[in-house]
Amino acid sequence: MALDFALGLPDDVAALQGVARDFALARLRERGQEADRSGDVPWDVLAEAGELGLCAPGVDEAYGGPGVSVQAQVAMMEELGWGNLGLAMAIASQGLLASAIARHGTEEQKRLYLPTLAGEGGLLLASLAVTEPEAGAELEMAAQGEQQRVRTEARRTDGGYSLEGRKRFIVNAGREGLLLVLAQTDPDAGLRGASLFLVRQGVAGVQFLGRTETSGLKSLQIGTLDFQACAVGEGMRLGQEGEGFQIAREVLQLGRVLTAAAEVGTARAAYEAAVAYARERRTMGRPIIEHQQVAGMLARMRTGIDAARLLVLRAAGDLDAGRDATLSSAEANFQSGEAAVSTLRNAVQTFGGYGFTQDFPVEMWLRDVLGSRIAYGGGDVQLMEVAEAIGRGA
Ligand SMILES: Cc1cc2nc3c(=O)[nH]c(=O)nc-3n(C[C@H](O)[C@H](O)[C@H](O)COP(=O)(O)OP(=O)(O)OC[C@H]3O[C@@H](n4cnc5c(N)ncnc54)[C@H](O)[C@@H]3O)c2cc1C
């Protein structure tokens, strides 16, 4: 039940999807499950993804990437999510920073970072650093009041800025990668006074405070970063002062769509496993797939996944066409999260007691989708975005 090409998708979709599918099958499935047991992040697999051109494939040819459409990227993400959700999310983080730099960066920033974010000459890991200990969801929703503000500050110095603050739940934290940090440049202007900065993790003034232990997504490292007197040159501000929140919102929209696609992939993996198990497992003299309740669960899974995928493709189409994707990305992310969680609940149920054991990956996938749902705004945040669009007359 993979992507339906009768939908008339661009030519670049099939090629990237094929590479991602082979990689997911050969590497992500096995290494992701190993990571779930050991808790060790398989960084080498991310480097391999870079070599294969799967990190930031939206980067333009002029900067070393293949420059594929967002629809191709979501087809890729579905396959990666089928392989392992945590690794798929780490890979998506590359594309988020690359798209922000491609759209808003100076020529120097593009030349400096786009090729290595896409994997050229050794992968430069990328992290979006928005969330703070005291502020998460409120930094992801349309600004509604002066209460919403970034606690991390960027104070003017000679020739640049000094960052002070703390960021939480940051993907790929603790590696010598590139951060895109949201910080307040005008403390009195709420989110209109926030700006974005490109900062290398290894520089003085950035301290890794440790990995956050999570119940799922063990193949993904998320952690806390502290900024103290961290000097950033003027040339490493992305966009103008005060544009940070708007650019971060664009990045989050793409993040919502790419994560939604990966969740569709994980849900598809669970559906496929559940169908195979239901055909084989027999009770009362026949395969459990012939029991109406079980068949009904499988039908619900499939319908939810297909619906989510169509919304993901629509949102990706909006991004490709340069249309406003606020509403479509929120709808896609909400639906994929709902479909993934309900599919996984039903998949565990289909496996009966075995679904709750570590003999099968369904319990891991359930833990994984509970985490992915929260990144880039949970279901509540997506619904707030949809409600806000309705209020605007959408
Ligand atoms: C796996 C994972 C990866 C992540 N990766 C990153 C990353 O790379 N970079 C990054 O910056 N952050 C990242 N995050 C952080 C994530 O974006 C935040 O956890 C999320 O925005 C919620 O913020 P919070 O945890 O502070 O919850 P809070 O903001 O405290 O919200 C708590 C609950 O209240 C709800 N809520 C809050 N305000 C409202 C409102 N106005 N109306 C309705 N409901 C509301 C929220 O939806 C949530 O359910 C990641 C998180 C996870 C779990």
Image (cartoon, rainbow, N blue to C red):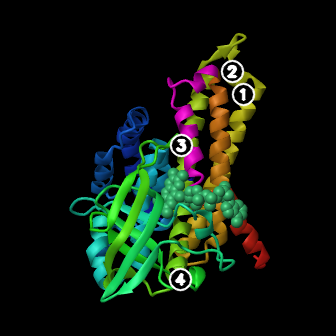
Location of mark 3 (residue): 368
Q: In which quarter of the image is residue 166?
A: bottom left
Per the image, label 1 sits on a secondary structure element best described as helix
Find out whether the residues at labels 3 and 1 contact each other: C-beta distance under 8 Å.
no
**Number of residues whose C-alpha sits closer than 10 Å to that of mark 1, classed few (under 14), some (14–19) or many (20 or more):** some
List the residue tagged with mark 4: 187
Q: The disc labelled 1 sits on which kind of residue?
A: Val
Disc 1 to disc 4, how far (Cα)? 56 Å
Q: What is the C-alpha distance between the residues marked 4 and 2? A: 61 Å
Q: Which residue occupies the extreme top position in the image?
A: 285
Q: What stretch is highlighted in magenta?
A: 353-375
Work out whether mark 4 precedes mark 2 in sequence or the reverse, and give the earlier one: 4
The residue carrying mark 2 is 288
Answer with the quarter of the image where residue 98 lies: bottom left
**Sequence-wise, which precedes: disc 4 or disc 3?**
4
Residue 374 lies left or right of residue 251; in this view the side is right
Q: In which quarter of the image is ligand 1?
A: bottom right
In this rendering, does residue 311 appear at all?
no
**Viewer-side residue, 79 vs 378:** 378
Looking at numbered disc 2 in the image, what kind of residue is underneath it? Ile
Q: Any atom of ligand 1 within 8 Å of the CB at mark 2?
A: no
Relative image position of residue 323 (x, y in whole percent): 59, 78
Badges 1 and 2: C-beta atoms under 8 Å apart? Answer: yes
Q: What element carries label 2?
A: helix
